Amino acid sequence: MSVTPTDVEHEVTAVDIIVSKGDEKGDITYANPIFFKISGYTQAELLEKPHSIIRHPDMPKIVFKYLWDNIKEGKDVKAFVKNLCKDGGFYWVFAHVRVATNPDGSFRNYVSTRKGMSAAARAIVEPLYKELLAAEESGGMDASLAMLEAFLKENGASLDTFNDAMQKIQNS
Ligand SMILES: Cc1cc2nc3c(=O)[nH]c(=O)nc-3n(C[C@H](O)[C@H](O)[C@H](O)COP(=O)(O)O)c2cc1C
């Protein structure tokens, strides 16, 4: 399914919590009604499909690399994400991806809980992602990783404190 992005923004209200769950590969095993409503897809179109169905081309790859490097190790990730809707529109969220385990400690699923992004965060993250994307296009992932690390450093953080840095930006 190929979707052509438009500049139509879909609003995430202050009370919206957009939830989905994924298996080891990131295929969608559950999504809440708000997820279907905002993305414009039906259950049949989304369930068992990869989460990348809502990947927006404005998203730098480095963000997803960071996500997967961490969740595969059982670590939570907080990240800002621009998502693509079925109609080509988009919405920005602040996502918290957790790794859920069974009582015996084995992997259960990945759970993403997404809230609206603050206006202050949007003003910081949108230009940052544009720069990361441009760096990736010209110098690949090494270039965007170096740029991300430099951004974190300027904010008194590092890759190890990425989640705290993102939370601080959301609250700013
Ligand atoms: C629980 C969970 C939720 C995810 N949510 C999103 C999401 O909202 N948007 C998105 O683009 N990718 C999301 N991903 C990441 C995708 O699996 C994928 O890495 C990303 O879309 C990049 O796709 P690509 O690696 O095929 O380029 C999620 C992954 C997991 C495990």
Image (cartoon, helix red, strand yellow):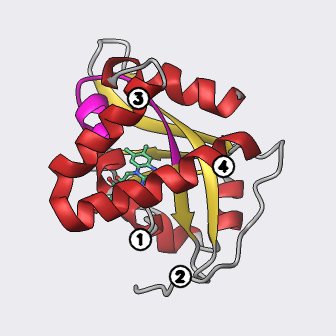
The residues bearing labels 1 and 2 have C-alpha atoms spaced at a distance of: 8 Å
* Residue contact at pointers 4 and 2, CB within 8 angstroms: no
Specify the segment rendered in magenta.
66-80
Above or below, 101 against 44 in this view is: above
Q: Write down the residue under mark 4.
A: 123
10 Å crowding of disc 4: few (<14), some (14-19), many (20+): few
The part of the image, by quadrant, that contains residue 23 is top left
Label 3 CB, ligand 1: below 8 Å? no
Residue 18 can be seen in this image? no
Q: Secondary structure at mark 3?
A: helix
Above or below, 92 against 6 in this view is: above
Residue 63 image offset from top left, x and y in percent: 36, 46
Q: Secondary structure at mark 1?
A: loop
Is residue 104 inside the magenta stretch?
no
The foreground one among 160 and 26 is 160
Residue 31 image offset from top left, x and y in percent: 57, 52
Label 4 CB, ligand 1: below 8 Å? no
Residue drawn at the location 23% of the way across and 35% of the way down: 69
Above or below, 7 against 18 in this view is: below
Amino acid residing under circle 2? Pro
Residue 108 image offset from top left, x and y in percent: 35, 30
Which circle, 3 or 2, is nearer the viewer? Answer: 3
Q: Upstream in the sequence, badge 3 or badge 1?
A: 1
The residues bearing labels 4 and 1 have C-alpha atoms spaced at a distance of: 19 Å
The foreground one among 133 and 36 is 133
Residue drawn at the location 44% of the way across and 27% of the way down: 154
Residue 75 can be seen in this image? yes
Amino acid residing under circle 1? Pro
10 Å crowding of disc 3: few (<14), some (14-19), many (20+): some
Q: Write down the residue under mark 2.
A: 5
